[in-house]
Image (tube, rainbow, N blue to C red):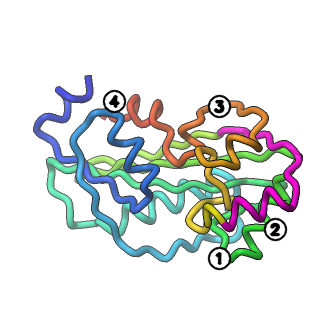
Amino acid sequence: MLFDKFKDKHIILASASPRRQELFKKLGIDFSIKTKEVEENYPSNLKEEEITNYLAILKAKAFEGEINKNEFIVTSDTIVWYKDSALEKPKNEKQAIEMLQKLSGTHHKVITSVCIKTTEVQKVFFDTTIVHFKHLTKEEIRFYIKKYKPFDKAGAYGIQEWIGFIGVRKIEGSYFNVMGLPVHKLYEELLKI
């Protein structure tokens, strides 16, 4: 079990995301939160999990030389991949509306990568979930954006919010991955280290 394995270790979750923090808590391991501002830019030739892997590693690199041998840094990045391009976090209401109009009545991939870094090891893995949306009306999209302000979410939506309840027809893969952390894979990888 992880609790025994990490008794003498200190896990640092490098994420300001309330969803990731909540999911991490539910794993039942003690951890602390430490964040750093990182410019989330990546080479334009990268696709799908290449993008999230790159960004998760970039976030972990920000802690280079700052961790001791009993510490683990965990970083993560999520994108929505739709028709050969990444939908990241919308910058404003107009972008959020455009994103949800694109996703309406179709399906897309949600890809999350996680990087676990210690002084000796760096392990990167990812998970992909396919999300199918019903056709969303303009009223539904506008209501959701006004009430929930999903500007901190890839693809302009949170599956655990109202839009997920009324809009998601089915998913193929992990629900928690869509929330931003593939906890089943994280658990397995932490056991291996």
Q: Where does label 3 land, which residue?
A: 173
Mark 3 burial class by Cα count in 10 Å: few <14, some 14-19, many 20+: some
Q: Is residue 160 above or below residue 93?
A: above
For this rendering, which residue is in front, 19 or 143? 143
Residue drawn at point x = 57 percent, y = 56 percent: 52
**What percent of the width, then of the height, locates residue 70?**
15, 47
- Left or right of 79: which side holds 4? left
Residues under labels 3 and 1: Cα distance? 28 Å
Q: Secondary structure at mark 4?
A: helix
| Sooner in the amino-acid sequence: mark 4 or mark 3 | 3
The mark tally for this picture is 4
Where, by quadrant of the figure, is residue 22 drawn?
Answer: top left
- Residue name at image x 59 percent, y 33 percent: 174
Distance from the alpha carbon under mark 4 to that under mark 3: 22 Å
Q: Which residues are magenta?
A: 129-146
Q: Answer with mark 4 or mark 1, whichever residue precedes in sequence.
A: 1
Q: Is residue 43 left or right of residue 107?
A: left
Q: Which residue is mark 4?
A: 192
Residue underneath mark 2: 98
CA gap between label 4 and label 1 equals 38 Å
Instruction: Please name the amino acid that badge 4 sits on.
Output: Lys
Q: Secondary structure at mark 2?
A: helix
First in sequence: mark 3 vs mark 1: 1
Q: Could you tell me the amino acid type at mark 2? A: Glu
